[in-house]
Image (cartoon, grey):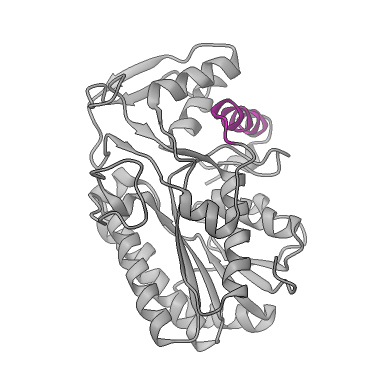
Amino acid sequence: MSDSKVSVLVTGGAGYIGSHAVLALRDSGWPVAVVDNLSTGVRELVPEGVPLYLGSIADRPLLRRVFAEQGTKAVMHFAGSIVVPESVSDPLTYYGNNTVGTHSLLSALVDSRVPHLLFSSTAAVYGIPKHLPVSEEAPKDPINPYGASKLMTERMLADGAAAYSFNYGALRYFNVSGADPQGRSGQSGKGSSHLIKVAVEAAVGKRDHVDVFGADYPTPDGTCIRDYIHVSDLANAHVSALERLIERPSENLVLNCGYGRGLSVLEVLNAVDRESGGQIQRELKPRRAGDPPAIVASNQRLVETLNWSPYYAEIDTIVRHALEWERKLASNPALDTS
């Protein structure tokens, strides 16, 4: 662990993954501030005592002011758009929010000489992998604008780090799920397309069924296979990655974030049934645009580089925490605004 804990700015810190990163940083004693425009974030997910700046990562003067006021030495960058089917129907918004927005953030970071950046990337940069599990060296061939926008940003970070005085980590997430085990945060906002979120909404009566998009994939039960990682394990990986960047300022990181095993859509829904004590209604639908049949991480580099290991890797645990959070939302609608 780094001896000195520097001030960290979390962009998108009122969102799902960003809010868990804020909790992980605070739990480990790091000074934290948040920038979020609350377009999808929830103000109540920012803990009391954490400065919240309302605004966009495209607002360079705002970012330079925040960096100066907070003495920021590191940025964890989660702000962006993340819905794959929406990226197919509205690609320019995704390139604008994810790539152009990060360009503005990076420009402000370089201007203010902030030396460390962690970027929220995605397994979607790989497209449809030819081999599983997929390693960081696998070909990058995204099949949707979401993945392409993130890959373009990774290239921008690599070029920027070679030219300017900062180092970076690009953490490629697989399927992030679950909620804070202490019930302090979880996935909020309406209209989610994430399977576990949709399934626990159905389990508590917010939906009357779950759509299964495609049952004719070349997988054992015909449904898509994904590598699900608990959001708190992912947040802890960010803290470890930040420590590594600080300890080794000439090193950059590109890391897959997953557990190295896949679960099908039906296996996940069965886990929700077990945890909820009910049975979710399934409705078969055609395949969704931009969905690969299977994608599973090789997490060897993550484990070895950061000495990271998960605490919440069992699917029933992930589902249980997500279900507990969904029940909390049902009793506190203010947390479920978007």
Q: Can residue 146 be seen from the camera position used here?
A: no
> Which residue sits at x=59%, y=19%?
275
> Which residue sits at x=29%, y=54%?
138
Image position, residue 80 (x, y; %): 43, 59
Q: Nearer the viewer, residue 163 or 59?
A: 163
Which part of the image, by quadrant, shows the N terminus?
bottom right
Image position, residue 232 (x, y; %): 62, 45
| Residue 329 inside the magenta-drawn segment | no
Picture quadrant of residue 157: bottom left
Report the side of 207 relative to 238 (left or right). Answer: left
> Which residue sits at x=26%, y=48%?
127
Q: Can residue 56 be seen from the camera position used here?
A: yes
Image position, residue 306 (x, y; %): 58, 58
Is 135 located above or below residue 103 in the figure?
A: above
Report the side of 20 relative to 48 (left or right). Answer: left
Is 207 located above or below residue 77 in the figure?
A: above
Q: Main secondary structure of the magenta part?
A: helix
Q: Nearer the viewer, residue 193 or 4?
A: 4
Report the side of 96 relative to 54 (left or right). Answer: left
Report the side of 69 relative to 302 (left or right). Answer: right
Region in magenta: 313-328
Is 229 located above or below residue 73 in the figure?
A: above
| Residue 325 inside the magenta-drawn segment | yes
Image position, residue 74 (x, y; %): 59, 73
Residue extending farthest to the top is: 278
Total marks placed? 0
> Which residue sits at x=42%, y=14%?
281
Is 14 located above or below residue 68 in the figure?
A: above
